[in-house]
Amino acid sequence: MNQNFLGKLDIKSMTPGELEAEFLEMGLPKYRAAQVFRWLARGVGDFSQMSDLSKELREQLRARYEIKSAAVELKRVSKDGTVKYLFRMNDGEFVESVLMRYRHGTSICISTQVGCKMGCDFCATGRSGFSRNLTASEILSQVQAASLDEGVRISNIVLMGMGEPLDNYDNVLRFLELVSDPNGMDIGMRHISLSTCGLVDKIYDLAERKLQLTLSVSLHAPNDAIRNRTMPVNRRWNVEALLKACRHYAKATGRRISFEYAMIRGVNDSDACALELADRLKGMLAHVNLIPVNAVEGAGYRKSQRERQQRFIEILSSRGIACTVRRTLGSDIEASCGQLKRRHEGGNENAG
């Protein structure tokens, strides 16, 4: 279990079973663990807020444990209701999250790492480098902080913010267990999407767990020639190896895979690319989500024109591949993860 520099344990990353074992070791009854777990699931940031515990017990817990939290450092609200957060972790590191409102409920896109190692060419986060993994409690804290700040119940979670979730595998699995616990936030796996740029070994492992979440794969190219240019991970696991793992995942779980495809003008948006992509995905339980690429400083990429996007959809659809263009939310507040953090750390808090 994670410890801070004072040697305190990360209590919010503990499962109910682990809390019980901890409390029994301290000579406390099991029901105390359930009480504390419920408080932590509500997003309390201090033991003093746990009003049904004695003052003596609260002090005992404070001496032994740390409650990790996500404090709102910056907040941007879009005209469409989308909210972009820059959260400050307990150690001063920053991560971003985006709250999105839809007719079917409120969703949040959260981060799993401070920065990212993957180095995708069109991604703002990757250009900022990598600092560290987030703990399960820090991932959970983003959901709680946004929910409390906006006074809304969050019904859907997308792990598609800063970082590669499968590169922080153990902490992400623990987060999934905590956030879906019926005595916690109780957000079911079918309401959670996990995005990966293609860590094939972890996709196979995830398939065996049959978690019933939605796996979103950042594909962005139909072949190795293009994907090698934009996504360094492809040099380790190429398109063929990745799609083989995806087919296995879909078969093992019975869950449709969502393929994310950033439309980059003149790079991956040609008719030939659409035809090749359709051939690659033929017969797979899959959906293609086209994303007009975000303008990232220094990348030099531009999003595909609307007519080209429509043509791409027509080609995929004519060959039986389900395909949509992602609705763009929060474009006026730079809702794409990584942009606000870069501006803030560059000293321009009011940019965007």
Image (cartoon, grey):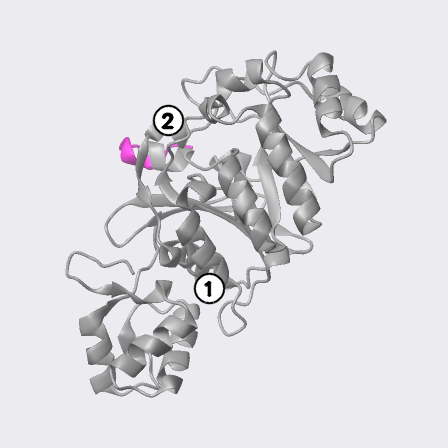
Quarter where residue 211 is shown: bottom right
Q: Which mark is residue 322?
A: none
Q: Is residue 202 visible?
A: yes
User: What amino acid is labelled 1 in the image?
Assistant: Leu
State the image coordinates of residue 169 (x, y, percent, origin top left): 43, 47
Task: State whether residue 187 is above or below residue 216.
Answer: below
Q: Which mark is residue 127?
A: 2
Neighbor class of circle 1 (other Cα within 10 Å; few <14, some 14-19, many 20+) is many
Task: State whether residue 123 is above or below residue 301.
Answer: below
| Nearer to us in this view, 303 or 237 | 237
Q: Quadrant of the C terminus?
A: top left
- Report helix, strand or loop for mark 2: helix
Q: Which mark is residue 178?
A: 1
Q: Which residues are magenta?
A: 344-352
Q: Residue furthest left?
A: 6
Neighbor class of circle 2 (other Cα within 10 Å; few <14, some 14-19, many 20+) is many
- Residue 224 is left or right of residue 150, and the answer is right
State the image coordinates of residue 210 (x, y, percent, origin top left): 61, 54
User: What amino acid is labelled 2 in the image?
Assistant: Arg
